[in-house]
Amino acid sequence: MQSVKRTLSLRTGAMQKVAYATLFSAAVSMNAYALDAPEGRVVLTVTGKISEQNTSNGAEFDLAMLRELGFEDQVTNTPWTDEANTYTGPRLKALLEAVGASGSQMVVTALNDYSAIVPVADAKKHNVLLALMSDGKMLSVRDKGPIFVVYPFDDDPSLNNEVIQNRSVWQVKSIRVD
């Protein structure tokens, strides 16, 4: 009887350790993209079907927070430029991962309230960039900033069509994940 109690006690202790380790791992992974509050001027607000928020309405990003998502370069022509430019900024898929997006489409809205519906699948399929810079200079509102959704038009010429051009929103202020 004594050995049965001791075995049960050992098993219970081991199971508790596994349970604590599992809970700790879950807590760490749930906070893998925990968002701090922006310290600078908010340039992008993400709302809708997201699990990570830093405000009661969604997730707000300043430039430093967008930089933390990782900047990449994309050299491409666009229908609105005369030559190829080097666009720099985070990938749309990195932003969607950071906010824990779970929808199938986004409504991307510009400062002038123009909006376009963009499939979430485009972020991965086309490696879409949220350009904050062009040729090493921050994008101003006059130059399609602060954020310009850039598809890799040169990498895939089939993207140069009216549907994709309409999804290439510039002067982006918000994204709602549906």
Image (cartoon, rainbow, N blue to C red):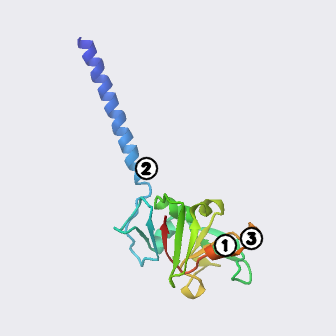
The spot of residue 162 in percent (x, y) is 69, 75
Q: CA separation, marks 1 and 3?
A: 16 Å
The answer to which of marks 3 and 2 sits earlier in the sequence is 2
Q: Do residues under tags 3 and 2 come within 8 Å of each other at their CB atoms? A: no
- Seen at 56% across and 65% down, the residue is 92
- Seen at 58% across and 68% down, the residue is 118
| Residue 37, image quadrant | bottom left
Q: Is residue 40 left or right of residue 129?
A: left
Q: CA separation, marks 3 and 2?
A: 37 Å
* Amino acid of disc 1: Val
Q: Secondary structure at mark 1?
A: helix
Q: Is residue 169 left or right of residue 34?
A: right
The residue identified by callout 2 is 29
Looking at the image, the residue that sits furthest to the bottom is 142
The spot of residue 113 in percent (x, y) is 50, 82
* Amino acid of disc 3: Asp
The residue identified by callout 1 is 163
The spot of residue 112 in percent (x, y) is 51, 85
